[in-house]
Image (spheres, rainbow, N blue to C red):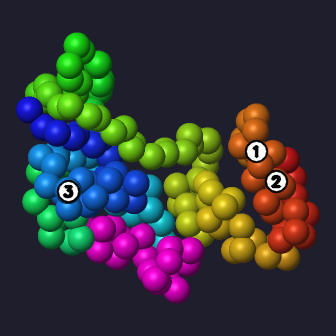
Amino acid sequence: MYDLIIAGAGPAGITAAVYAARKKMKTLVITKNIGGYAASSASVENYIGYQFISGAELAKKFEEHLKSFDVEITENTEVVCVRKLDNHFNVETAKEDYKCLTAIVATGRKPKLLDVPGEVKFKNRGVTYCATCDAPLFTGKDVAVIGGGNSAMDATIQLISIANNIYL
């Protein structure tokens, strides 16, 4: 039985794993890939300590840091269910079940794609999915925000002082 199982190895999951390892907790990280959403970014300019770093480079640094600790890592695996039982959690993957005293779900975000022509081709070259991360790239430009509910309005509000025209 593990003291802690963490689903996800983006910045939050890795940070939790590092702190747990420093406290000598028996820890397992289960993840599809190390680095999370940041790994797919062409450039990262808002991560403290790096004025500019590619998402792939940042993910590599995350991985090196994580693997410098005594943490078990299962990659290319997705957690499908976390169940609270009497005195522990059961963490299920497609291949195996694991038991732990504490579970952290840090699976991050995965933007919903529009599935329109050019979307994949222009990802990180005009098509982005994070106004908080990428708004400065659109300084003085005309921008279309596509989305629903609060997220589209939040992105629009973040772009108001940066973009030239915003189409919602």
- Asked if the magenta segment contains residue 146, the reply would be no
Q: Nearer the viewer, mark 2 or mark 3?
A: 3
- Asked if the magenta segment contains residue 58, the reply would be yes
Q: Residue furthest bottom?
A: 51
The reply, left or right, for residue 134 in relation to residue 78 is right
Identify the residue position indicated by label 1 in the image.
152
The residues bearing labels 3 and 1 have C-alpha atoms spaced at a distance of 41 Å
The residues bearing labels 2 and 1 have C-alpha atoms spaced at a distance of 6 Å
State whether residue 148 is above or below residue 57. Answer: above
- Rendered residue at 24%/53% (across/down): 20
Q: Quadrant of the N terminus?
A: top left
Identify the residue position indicated by label 2 in the image.
156
Q: Amino acid at mark 1?
A: Ala
- Can you tell which quarter of the image residue 86 is in? top left
- Dots 3, 1 in contact, CB < 8 A: no
Q: 137 or 47, which is in the foreground?
A: 47
State the SS at label 2. Answer: helix
Question: Who comes first in sequence, dot 2 or dot 3?
Answer: 3
State the SS at label 3. Answer: loop
Q: Nearer the viewer, mark 3 or mark 1?
A: 3
How crowded pointer 3 is (Cα within 10 Å; few <14, some 14-19, many 20+) is rated as few
Q: Residue 88 in the image: state x and y as whole percent.
A: 20, 23
Question: Who comes first in sequence, dot 3 or dot 1?
Answer: 3
- Dots 2, 1 in contact, CB < 8 A: yes
- Rendered residue at 48%/66% (across/down): 41
Q: Amino acid at mark 2?
A: Thr
Residue stretch rendered in magenta on the structure: 43-63
Residue 154 visible, this orientation = yes
Labels in figure, total? 3
Q: Residue 51 in the image: state x and y as whole percent.
A: 52, 86
The reply, left or right, for residue 158 in relation to residue 9 is right
